[in-house]
Image: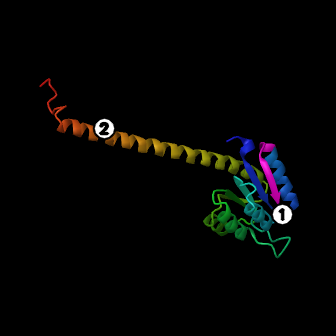
Amino acid sequence: MSDKNIIIFIVEDDPLHLQMLHDHLTKMSDFAIKDFGTGEECIAYLKQKKETPDIIFLDYFLDNVDKQAMDGLEALVEIKKIAPTTDVVMLSRQDKIQVAVDVMKYGAFDYIVKGESAFYRAEKTVYNIYRYSKMLKNAGTYKKISIAFAIAFTLMILLFIYMQQKGLITNNPGWL
C-alpha cells in the first residue's frame, strides 16, 4: 500500500487544530486527506459512498462550536456502522482513562490526547495502522498456507493407507 492509496479524513470543529493536523500529515507523506468540520458532514459523505477512508481522525468534542452537532462518540458509532473496516482515531483534550476506554469499546483504533505530542502520536498511529493492516494480510496468507498444508498432509496419509490396504506397500522395510 503506497502513501497515495491511503485516504485520511480529519473531522475537527476547531479550524486551527484541523489545519495543523492536516499540514503535519501532509508533510509526513503524500496522503489523500479530506477535512470535515462536523461529524454530520463526514457521515453524509460516507453515505454517498464517494470514497471510503483508511483512517479517520475524529475529535471527541465535535459539539464545541455548534451545540446541536453530534459529539465524537455518536459520530464514531455511526461511522463504524457505515465503514466498519475504517480505523478511527479519537482526538480529545481530555486526559481521562475512562474516555479512552469508552471510545475503544465503540471501535476506535487509538485515542490521542491533544497537546504537544499529539502530532507525533498521530504520525505513530498512522504507522501502526499500516503495520497492523500488513500483519492482518500476512496472517491471512499464513492461514491459507496452513490449511493447504493440512489438506495435503491428510491426502498423503489417506494415500498411504490406501496403498497399504492394496498391498502396494508393506509394514516390513525390507532390510530386516
Residue 37 is labelled as 1
For the residue pair 138 and 60, the one nearer the viewer reads as 138
Residue positioned 67% across, 42% down in the render: 1
Residue 15 placement, left or right of 52: right
Residue 86 is labelled as none
Q: Residue flagged by tag 2: what amino acid is it?
A: Met
Residue positioned 85% across, 63% down in the render: 14
For the residue pair 30 and 52, the one nearer the viewer reads as 52
Q: Residues within 10 Å of mark 1 (few under 14, many from 20)?
A: some
Question: Residue extending furthest right?
Answer: 16
Quarter of image, res 10: bottom right
Quarter of image, res 36: bottom right
Precedes in sequence: disc 1 or disc 2: 1
The magenta span reads 27-37
Report if residue 117 is visible in the image: no
Which one is in front in this view, the residue at disc 1 or the one at disc 2?
2
- Residue 29 magenta: yes
Q: Residue flagged by tag 1: what amino acid is it?
A: Gly
Residue positioned 72% across, 44% down in the render: 5
- Residue 50 magenta: no
The relative height of residue 56 versus residue 147 in the rendered view (above or below) is below
Residue 59 horizontal/vertical position (percent):
76, 63
Residue 156 is labelled as 2
The relative height of residue 105 versus residue 147 in the rendered view (above or below) is below
> Where, quadrant-wise, is the C terminus in this rendering?
top left
Residue 136 placement, left or right of 78: left
Residue 87 horizontal/vertical position (percent):
66, 56
Mark 1 → mark 2, Cα distance in angstroms: 61 Å
Q: Secondary structure at mark 1?
A: loop
Q: Residues within 10 Å of mark 2 (few under 14, many from 20)?
A: few
Report if residue 148 is visible in the image: yes
